[in-house]
Amino acid sequence: MALPTNITKAVYLDPGVAQYRGNPLIEALPPILTTQDIRKGLIGDVTYDPREAFVDGSKRVHIIARLLDDFFQPLANHIQLETKLSIMIRRGYVGRNLADGSLNAHMQNGYERLMKGELGVFRFEQAKSTARSLALIGCSGSGKSTTLNRILATYPQAIYHEVYNFTQITYLKVDCPHDGSLKNLCIHFFRAIDNLIHTDYEQKYALKRHSIDTLLALMSQIANLHAIGVLVIDEIQHLSRQRSGGVEQMLNFFVTLVNVIGLPVVMVGTPKARPIFETDLRSGRRGAGFGALIWHPVKQQPSTQNPKTGQIQKSEWTAFTDKLWKYQWLQKRDELLSDDIRDCWYELSQGVLDIVVKLFVLAQLRAIATRTERLTSKLMRQVYTDEFKPVHPMLDALRSGDEERIAKYSDLTFPEIDEKLLELSAKIEESIASDQEELEQYGGNEQAERLHNLLIAMDCKSDLLVPLIKKAFKQKPGLSVRELIPVVLDWYDRPGKKPDGNSTKTKNKSISRKDWHTLETSDLRFKFTQVDDDASLYDGLKQSGMIFNTEAWLKEAG
């Protein structure tokens, strides 16, 4: 029998743990990962070719935008979450075994509950729950959903056991309904299973006038019928206490899923969901699960030195930003991330990983659109001011450290990222159109156009290049683009000479002040463009350490 592409045929492996052996539902899972394997499995696959920095700006937009989806750097809390999920899934199957009949006992209990309408009915006392629950709380953009999706993707979602003619669902992820009702949450559960294995549970059960208890009993039976490994409920803060019968009933709903049905549950939410979890902590029912993982934004901490080995241990913030900094497709990029930019980056993003990456992406696009072709703290501030207005309140709350303010703004997202990409892409297209007018003077000679773009990237003035490049291709047609570069540069650097050999009155053409931001980083005119409007160039140079601090020197000498 040919299986659907989203269902994997079971292959049984020794799980390496005595308690897990002899359980087909566990033996069909991937091997338990080491910390090193977890890092390799989670890390984002971003290919980087430095030559792509010299392709057209319109193409670089697409290259840089890949970071939004592909870049992922595993941190300590990501490793911790993977370990807890691994334990939850496998421990949850200990009490549900295809081979020894314990799964059948759970299904028979579910049938009894359906027939009698009582969730507490047990026909087989040995059907004990080994499931656990976990609450994952963090502000929007902290990477909760992204990390969960990457971890769950390391498991095949549906596994077919041919020997038992049984389809196992290793995980099911549903989002809380925006209307906040527990009934609609149940409907989302049935719909998710239908979409995965092409059943019709939503039509058969969810769309009828069933009570919450009946729907929960039906969920129990279906969860066991397909041996769901873990149920992930995302955006838990959308649950409405009013429409769900209050915090206590909501909590009872989740406790029943875990303790009665035997289904491991991960509840994911922002600090707005805190009342649900606080009740759980006060009630003493925390012992039924793994408690709560609180994900804070990444902290800005200095790197430390190992006293024994002398090796520098980077902080998570330093390691994350160093890794991300490598993925620049800018022609004048600085290879090393300066402390000034790193500090500015943290001040603006407050360590919210989603904002960190999006700020980095949009800043690169702005650098291309303005022909700055490098990242600076001033450019980052401009991008933050112009493009990130929707999240200013949330980030201001994080800067304040006030938990009430943070909870108030914790649901803010940055949905306009695609719109911002299109706007900056349009600006880049305008810039390219201007350049194209110059390139048209080469009559479609692609090699001449390529040589022109390479020399522009080397800070040559475009208005001087066209006649020189035309002369080079006319006089030396047999040379390659690489061989022509030093020839054109030699002519370009000769003072007082036109391409035809005649003298000129002026030796060098000055660059307009509005274009100073395109000069080399070491150029004082470029540094002037990076000084705040209310500060002098002298103060800016002094702050950057380029001017010798005589006062400090005299004080130390005295």
Image (cartoon, rainbow, N blue to C red):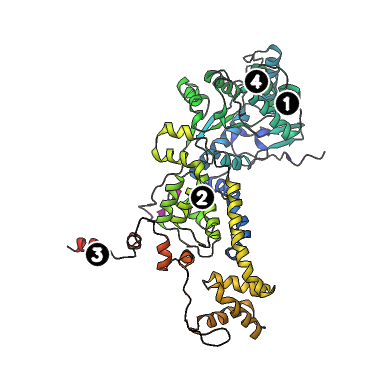
Marks 3 and 1 close (CB-CB < 8 Å): no
What secondary structure is the stretch in magenta mostly built from? loop
- Tell me the CA gap for discs 2 and 3: 38 Å
Residue type pointed to by label 1: Glu
| Front of the two marks 1 and 4 | 1
In the rendered image, the residue lying farthest to the left is 558
What residue appears at the point 47 percent right and 32 percent down from the top-left corner? Answer: 408
As helix, strand or loop, the secondary structure at mark 3 comes to helix
| Front of the two marks 4 and 2 | 2
Choose top left, top right, bottom left or bottom right for residue 191: top right
Marks 4 and 2 close (CB-CB < 8 Å): no
- Tell me the CA gap for discs 4 and 2: 43 Å
Picture layout, residue 345 above or below residue 484: above
What residue appears at the point 49 percent right and 51 percent down from the top-left corner? Answer: 383
Residue position marked by numbered label 4 in the rendering:
216
Q: Nearer the viewer, residue 196 or 373?
A: 373
Image coordinates of residue 426 in percent, x first then y, are 61, 55
Residue position marked by numbered label 2 in the rendering:
359
Badge 4 or badge 3: first in the primary sequence: 4
Image coordinates of residue 432 in percent, x first then y, are 61, 63
Badge 2 or badge 1: first in the primary sequence: 1
Residue position marked by numbered label 3 in the rendering:
550
Residue type pointed to by label 3: Thr
In this picture, which residue range is highlighted in magenta?
299-317
- Tell me the CA gap for discs 4 and 3: 76 Å
Badge 3 or badge 1: first in the primary sequence: 1
- Around disc 1, counting alpha carbons within 10 Å, would you say few (fewer than 14), some (14 to 19), or many (20 or more)? some
- Tell me the CA gap for discs 2 and 1: 41 Å
As helix, strand or loop, the secondary structure at mark 2 comes to helix
Q: Which of 479 and 471 is in front in this view?
A: 471
Residue position marked by numbered label 1 in the rendering:
202
Badge 2 or badge 3: first in the primary sequence: 2
